[in-house]
Image: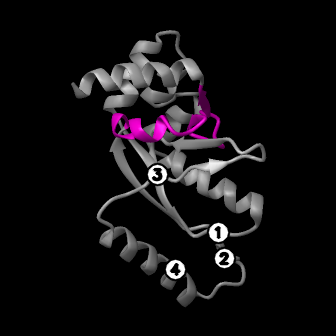
Amino acid sequence: MGLKSILRKLGWRDRLSRLARGTDRVRFVRSLGEAPVFIIVGMDAQGFDPQEATAEEIVSVAERGTKALHEAESFTPWVWGDDNGRQYLPLFSTSRHLEEYAAARCRKHGRSFPIQAVSVAGAILLPTLRTVDGAILNPDSTDEYSLGKADIELCCEMWESQDR
């Protein structure tokens, strides 16, 4: 068992997850803007049943996703909508959180949904943050944190001033 596994069992969180739960909102937003975060840029909406799929089908799905990611000239962050028409941007502070999210979706729906993700500096997401109703850091994990309206407004204020 590696050191990170032991630390996680003892309640250790990555830096962004710790800052999200802290009281210093400016420090959190600054770190979120500078840190690499994983975003989903593509997802196979139909998914497949991992119990019934053949090895060839799984490889084919992975190859299609890899090819699409490689050939893309730009990426649009994936957002999800709730039953009330609100849209949310999922953000992941580590690849482990992204993997947990994919596993949770698979358990919930009984299907595997291949995900295409990239790592970007959080501030790159400013245009998307302006169009969604909220953002969720590490959804479906013990480190889940919903960015409130005040957090998003602070992101817009701080990150916009960095562009000038």
Which residue type carries mark 1?
Answer: Ser
Which residue is under mark 4? Answer: 61
Residue identifier under label 2: 48
> The residue under label 2 is which amino acid type?
Phe
Horizontal side of residue 155 vs 13, given as left or right: left
Q: Are marks 2 and 4 in contact (CB under 8 Å)?
A: yes
Q: Is residue 23 left or right of residue 162?
A: right
Secondary-structure class at tag 1: loop
Of marks 2 and 1, which one's residue comes earlier in the chain? 2
Q: Is 119 placed above or below 158 here?
A: below
**Residue at image mark 3:** 77
Distance between the Cα atoms at labels 4 and 1?
Answer: 11 Å
Along the viewing direction, whichever of 158 and 111 lies nearer the viewer: 158
Report x, y in % for residue 11: 58, 28
Which mark is nearer the camera, 3 or 4? Answer: 3
Q: Identify the residue position indicated by label 1 in the image.
A: 112
Q: Are marks 2 and 1 in contact (CB under 8 Å)?
A: yes
Tell me: residue 15, above or below residue 132: above
SS class, disc 3: loop
- Badge 3 amino acid: Pro
Task: Give residue 52's quadrant in the image.
Answer: bottom right
Q: Which residues are magenta?
A: 122-147
Q: Residue at x 68, y 41 (%)?
A: 86
